[in-house]
Image: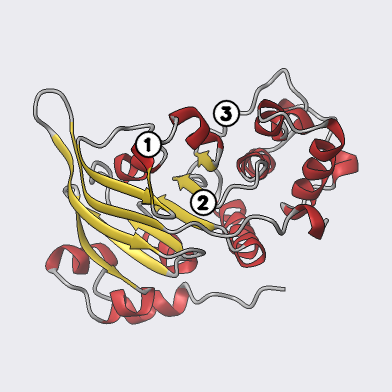
Amino acid sequence: MADNLERARGSRIELRGVGVTYPGGTAAVRDVDLTIAAGEFTVFLGPSGSGKSTLVRTINRLIEPTAGTILLDGVDARTLDPVALRRGIGYVIQAVGLFPHLTIAANVGVVPRLLGWDRARIAARVDALLALVRLDPARYRDRYPRELSGGEQQRVGVARALAAEPRALLMDEPFGAVDAIVRASLQDEIRRIHRELGTTIVFVTHDVDEALRLADRIVVIAEGTIAQADSPDRLLAAPASGVVRSLVGIDAASRRFATERPLLP
């Protein structure tokens, strides 16, 4: 399995003065400057409507910025073909969007097929990724999405997003539709996968405890701008503003203890 999973490492992502203004003049994102280091697990945290999902979608050009520049490993994203760009960046959302008429193996192999990989390479990649997300390939590859639980479908969604060896993975509220026990398990799995692959991950959530559990760095988004970008410990110890303080809550010490990361196997 390792031979099929070790090629891609993380991309460096730079946002320089990025803004998104919708027709009619509504500014969803305003003048965002942020550098995400290669291999970093960054969480965009903020309430609904803060602009965090809009911002993450500018990275793969699902939403085109109306101001500023986004660089991927030093290359201006606007100079890249948007379809090719999206095929090279993993993307996971809450509504997993598996194709119901395709088997799990076929779902995971969609992008590699579009890229012209040969059958043997696709089959090996599919089996390696199913094993990575802890779904036994022999048991799951020939099943259909309707035969899987919500948590299992989300694992397949992660496998599919990683199929073409992306150097960056965008995750927009990916675990919001599953129950608390499954959600905690998926959080542990994505942390383990991040540790194993070194892929740059940008993860969107409105859940403070989820952000604290996952992030190397938390970027708090409020009203379309960055209110604070810091490590989880620093964010709790020294909120930069009343907005951040109200988001993380007054009992920061207890919250940090409650979300302390367990040792991974």
Q: Which one is earlier in the sequence, the residue at label 2 or at label 3?
A: 3
The answer to whether marks 2 and 1 mark residues whose Cβ atoms lie closer than 8 Å is no
In the structure shown, which secondary structural element does the residue marked by tag 3 occupy?
A: loop
- Name the residue beneath numbered marker 3: 97
| Residue drawn at (65%, 32%) of the image | 111
In the structure shown, which secondary structural element does the residue marked by tag 2 occupy?
A: strand
- Name the residue beneath numbered marker 1: 79
| Residue 36 placement, left or right of 226 | right
In the structure shown, which secondary structural element does the residue marked by tag 1 occupy?
A: helix
The Cα–Cα distance between marks 2 and 3, rounded to whole angstroms, is 19 Å
Query: Between residues 57 and 239, which one lies in front from this camera angle?
Result: 57
Which of the numbered marks, if any, corresponds to residue 108? none
The Cα–Cα distance between marks 2 and 1, rounded to whole angstroms, is 18 Å
The answer to whether marks 1 and 3 mark residues whose Cβ atoms lie closer than 8 Å is no
Query: Which amino acid does the dot numbered 3 rest on?
Result: Gly
Q: Position of residue 178 (x, y in %)?
A: 55, 44
Query: Which amino acid does the dot numbered 2 rest on?
Result: Ala
Q: Which of labels 2 and 1 is toward the front?
A: 1
Q: Quadrant of the N terminus?
A: bottom right
Which of the numbered marks, if any, corresponds to residue 168? 2
